[in-house]
Image (cartoon, grey):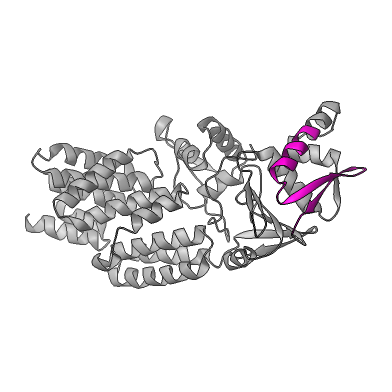
Amino acid sequence: MDSLITAAARALAAGDPLGALNRVALREDPPALALRGIAMAQLADFERARALLRKAGRAFGPKEAVARARCLVAEAEIAFVSRDLGWPEKALDAARAILEQHGDRVNAAHALHLEVRRLLLLGHLDGAERKLASLNPARLPPALQASHHLVLAGIAMRRVQTKAARIALARAARAAQAARIPGLIAEVENAAAVLDAPAARLIAQGQARVLLLADVEALQRSTALIADACRYTVRDPRAEISLGRRPVLFALARTLAEAWPGDVSRDVLVARAFGAKRADESHRARLRVEIGRLRAAVKTLANITATRDGFALKPRRAVEVLVLARPVEERHAAVLAFLADGESWSSSALALALGSSQRNVQRALDTLAASGKVQFFGKGRARRWVTPPLPGFATTLLLPIALAGD
């Protein structure tokens, strides 16, 4: 490899894309095309970066399998950053296998981190943890060590383990400082700020207060019956019932939990569960059916009794009932939560992350765009949606789940 290519590669590794471009901007050989593609990706020109990397991959000969695999890994990273979660993971896995086979352990580790971060974004925490366990971060360069500990912190935050998250973030910060890459240092700082941002709201007997992630963790040790509107579950210390795929039942459970120890009228339950402004006999009949289904679903945790005006929730073991809600709530809060990371998302990627249909997500995006809360750029399949991050809004609890409110 000639000296200009070596210098450009070192500049990219140090987070200096302009320095790399100064050395290879006028060259058309495959290594220069690949480095130019990575430099353009660091400058956030993803379309140009993707085109350059594909051109480089085609230009490398059949005997240059490692170089072609590196181009695939770089292209996969661009797909991840631009939130194109439909990028073929089998291609990335094959590229990683080639790199490992030829002894390029650093780039193979980078490919594995991309796989893990994709799983983390999709909420597959167990799979992400299993893959990450195969890596020893001590053998990695500082930049990859920082990435490794960032993923560990992300898993810990989504499991609501604040102590483990802080330890991982401290290690990530030390590694990022050793790497001396400003963008990586900023990423670690942004991740650390999530621990001190509002993560949820606690609603009890009509009163609401904001909780940090540490408060949510402490709440997990509570003896109360909790209707968790972040994960769409109802739980007490002994059991947890998921209602993520049964939005009507969770809407009823939450409404009853918010009113505890009182009851809720049938008209209010109909409005909250079915969106009807006025309840007629068909709504009341449907309400009786859904209350019966809810009673069966949560029978190990609570009983639902009929009162003169409506229904009331009676916990079997807990002495109080609480509701854990998102810090910001509106009809399309789940979509906004993913867009709040500041990255650009395609509607197909959002649908994959949310476990919903692309049509439902597109309707939600159109509604949010009409109210000025999101914007898009590009046309057709290249269209991406963005929004400025919501100030003081932690998204760690907003795990991928079907659009229960839609």
- Residue placed at 25% from the left, 50% from the top? 38
Q: Position of residue 115 (x, y in %)?
A: 34, 49
Q: Which residues are magenta?
A: 288-317
Residue 105 sits above or below residue 222 on the image: above
Q: Position of residue 231 (x, y in %)?
A: 60, 50
Q: Nearer the viewer, residue 348 or 227?
A: 227
Q: Is residue 291 magenta?
A: yes
Q: Residue furthest top?
A: 282
Q: Nearer the viewer, residue 117 or 33?
A: 117
The answer to whether residue 204 is left or right of residue 15 is right
Residue 306 sits above or below residue 203 on the image: above
Q: Quadrant of the image for the C terminus?
A: top right
The answer to whether residue 51 is left or right of residue 320 is left
The answer to whether residue 371 is left or right of residue 20 is right
- Residue placed at 66% from the left, 46% from the top? 330
Q: Position of residue 203 (x, y in %)?
A: 73, 58
Do we see residue 49 in this rendering?
Answer: no
Specify the quadrant of the image occupied by residue 79: top left
